[in-house]
Amino acid sequence: MAATTRRARQRPRIARTAMAVAGAIVFSLPVTAAAQTIAITGGRVFPVSGPPIDNATVLIRDGRIVAVGANVTVPANAQRVDATGKWVTPGLIDAATQLGAVEIGAVPDTREASARGQDAVAAAFRVSDGLNPASVMITPARNEGVTSVVVVPSGNLVSGQAAFIDLVHGSAHDMVAASPVAMVGEVGNKRAANVSARGELLMRLRELLEDTRAYAQHRAAYEQGNTRSYRASRLDLDAMIPVVQGRLPLLVEADKASDIVAALDLAREFGLKIMIGGGAEAWMVADDLSRAHVPVLTGAMNNIPDAFATLGQRQENAALLQKAGVQVILIGNAGGGDEEAFNVRNIKQEAGNAVAYGLPWDAALRAVTLAPAEAFGVSDRYGSLAPGKVANVVVWSGDPFEFTTRAEHVFVHGEEHREPSRQDMLTERYKTLPPDYDRP
Amino acid sequence: MRTAAIVLAAAVVLGCATGRATRPAGESPATPRSDSAQSASATPDYGPGALSLPNADPFPSTYKPFPSRPTVIRNATIFTAAGPHIEHGSVYIRDGKIVAVGATVNAPPDAIVIDGTGKYVTPGIIDVHSHLGVYAAPGVQALSDGNEATNPVTANVWAEHSVWPQDPQFPRNLAGGVTTLQVLPGSANLIGGRSVVLKVVPARTVQGMKYPGAKYGLKMACGENPKRVYANRGPSTRMGNVAGYRNAWIQAEDYRRRWDKWLADRKGEPPKRDLGLETLAEVLRGHILVHNHCYRADEMAQMIDIAHEFGYKVRAFHHGIEAYKIADLLAREGIGAAVWADWGGFKMEAMDAVRANLALVDKAGVRAMIHSDDPSGSQRLNQEAAKAMAAGRAIGIDISEDQAIKWLTINPAWALDLDKEIGSLEPGKHADLVLWSSDPFSVYSRAEKVWIDGALMYDRLDPTEQWRTDFELGFVPDNRGGSK
């Protein structure tokens, strides 16, 4: 019952353990804007995949980037966007959010991010199936330069399947760029996993991984009822197959250093491809993570020992990990907080704070663009400004991480978006009091 | 930079050698405790605890400023919160007080000199809405002491009795430039109890942190929280909430009348003492300030009517998600608005949060302030103010940094009725100040040094000037000095 002032004591976790999704990984093609050529000219361009280029042009055609550089010829029919004195970057990516899956945290009917599951396993649950393309939280995020997010499920030992979505208008089908991009699971949250000891939690994971392997090998026999029984459902086992085959990453929610090590051990034992989400104490095992090439999704504004699993939490986490060679992905609010979807835009603040605590600026930009695209397997299309990439591009009035900087042009799929958010409408309505509807 | 570090090291040594600064006469806690004692002795039949005395102070502050040395910060940009900022300016502090602020100051040769080139100075940050100590870290049930959620009206509880001085969130707050906190009970209840104003300093007891002479606050809460918590026994509706407040004030007025009459004539047996009604009576007498958690515009307007009905004032609405919808009303009533920069959307009553809230209420003439309600956000109130300032500018309200700095300094000082002592850099005021590595409205700026009552309490560059709580020893890796 948590009545309180503070809206939530413990940040909801982002990710949870997991394993696999049956079936092939589906990539849908983005909706392309009407055949159209746009030239963003004169700006300081940060391709991320290469060094910044001054006075450069980004040429966009039919929703894709076709050229980036200082000597790009602008076709006569191109619509020009003058970015002189501006900064041009790929659209930002918040790699762990419930945007579109949770509208109002305290209203259960608008929460679609946590499945009931069976014995705390919900591997077959696809969070994108409940995506709300009409969420009023999407416009504020996009207006401030966030063009894609990874929507992660939560709850349970295995939460389900995450989706990479673009913040475009349209149906969920139009928005989902790739799903699943990860199975989400847990090694540190006993309550979510419905167990009473960390060892029991790992035991449950091992059981699921072993059963998935056995199931994958004996599917025909399973259909004929000629295998031993498995604790997990058929759908969950199917969903776990790409995980045990190392094709789909398992995003493991873990904060405590020893839990992270346990996750690394599990990955080695089963040949899993994993990422760590949360990672409060990841800096303490940075070398292990680096050696195992395991990326870490973490925030940059957490320094409170707010649980016994996060005693070593500190704001230098991202910088120390990066220094050790770990792929760092910055996420909002360490992936939680019940106003989290409302403030996906604050991914910029996370990045700025990471810089204030030692992360090089270029690495911070990478951590909210190309790094998440790589970790979730979509860097062929997202996270950088280069020919062939999806034209998610932002023109900023200055340093994107500074509070006074504005996202002046936001392109998603090569189309500029700039409609007022619900917050903008409220502001406009009450800017002069009394409001029109209450005027005599 | 190098110079500053060396000078600072000297400050530490000298500071210790000097011993504790003495509190100037007249600065002692302005508590009428002596009155209470006198009253009690005038009627020897009763010990002080038997009487419901106005302004009683049974848990007096034992805070004394830490040792300090005369210090000058030179060539910094200074946001005074009392006027335009001063570029290449200086601040001179001595004996816990600000002596001079300006383009140049006369400082004696024995003063420690800190080179502020490229840096910024602001008053110490004041967070009027904190639960540090009462919801301590780690957030385990054993340390969850912020809501006495056993009755919708618990005016009888005092937040200070839940404050754990070893909460590791305190030193982190200090490192964020926060020098004064109002710690409140939570919002489970219609009337949650008394708040306490603390200095963010290490102490063995909460009495050692209490801001001497600060008024108490009363925490009240509107809307969803109380009706959710008490859904089974009531109130379970907003109309039930309002009936609950009014019932409490009816009893409080009766209590105040009986006690004030008895205190005036001292005839017969004193009325029976009641802890909760005593606190409410003190609100009615104007000695305790009302801090009202309230999100929606329509509910704030109702709370204002209740205050009129019973003759008390709401000092500030906290959280005030919809304050911008009634900024004219708040301005007319002289009620402050303590709000977040951009928290919202997490429940129905928070749906209409807008980032320009602070700028809009400020423009309407309301005392606007940023607050945290959160141990993490409290460490970055400068960043929250920066977001709110930018949002104002985006809709054409020209909020200057000189104005925005007031949101986290002098305006919250006013909400605590301490604006004559703290909240701005002016001669004679307490030397609570922060030296920032760069413009505090930049995301890259960090508090580098923090002084409280003239004493250097935090130095990011000197691990020996970084406070570690008892809890942290052994449990939390010692990262002091570990940042770049």
Image: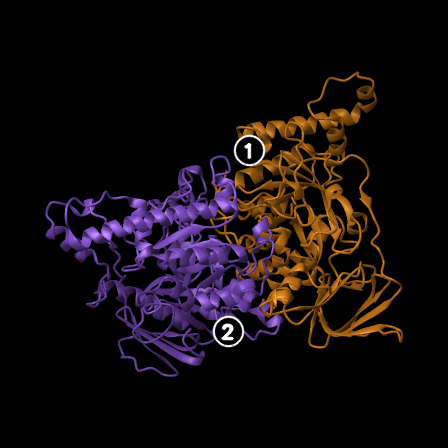
Chain colours: A orange, B purple
Q: Position of residue B439 (x, y in %)?
A: 50, 71
The answer to whether one can see residue A310 in this image is no
Q: How many marks?
A: 2
State which quadrant residue B454 falls in.
Answer: bottom left
Q: Nearer the viewer, mark 1 or mark 2?
A: 2
Residue B308 x %, y % = 41, 59
Q: Position of residue B254 (x, y in %)?
A: 30, 49
Q: Secondary structure at mark 1?
A: helix
* Closest to the observer, A421 or B211: A421
- Circle 2 residues within 10 Å: few <14, some 14–19, many ≥20: some
The numbered disc on residue A180 is none
Taking depth in this image into account, of B97 and A188 the one nearest to the observer is B97
Q: CA distance from mark 1 to mark 2?
A: 46 Å
Residue toward you, B392 or B169: B392
Which residue is tagged 1? A191
Q: Which residue is the site of mark 2?
A: B401
- Residue in view at x 45 percent, y 58 percent: B304
Q: Chain of mark 1?
A: A
Tag 2: amino acid: Glu
Q: Chain of mark 2?
A: B
Is residue A315 visible to the viewer in this orientation of the structure?
Answer: yes
Task: Say whether marks 1 and 2 touch (CB < 8 Å).
Answer: no
B446 lies left or right of A241: left
What's the residue type where badge 1 is placed?
A: Arg
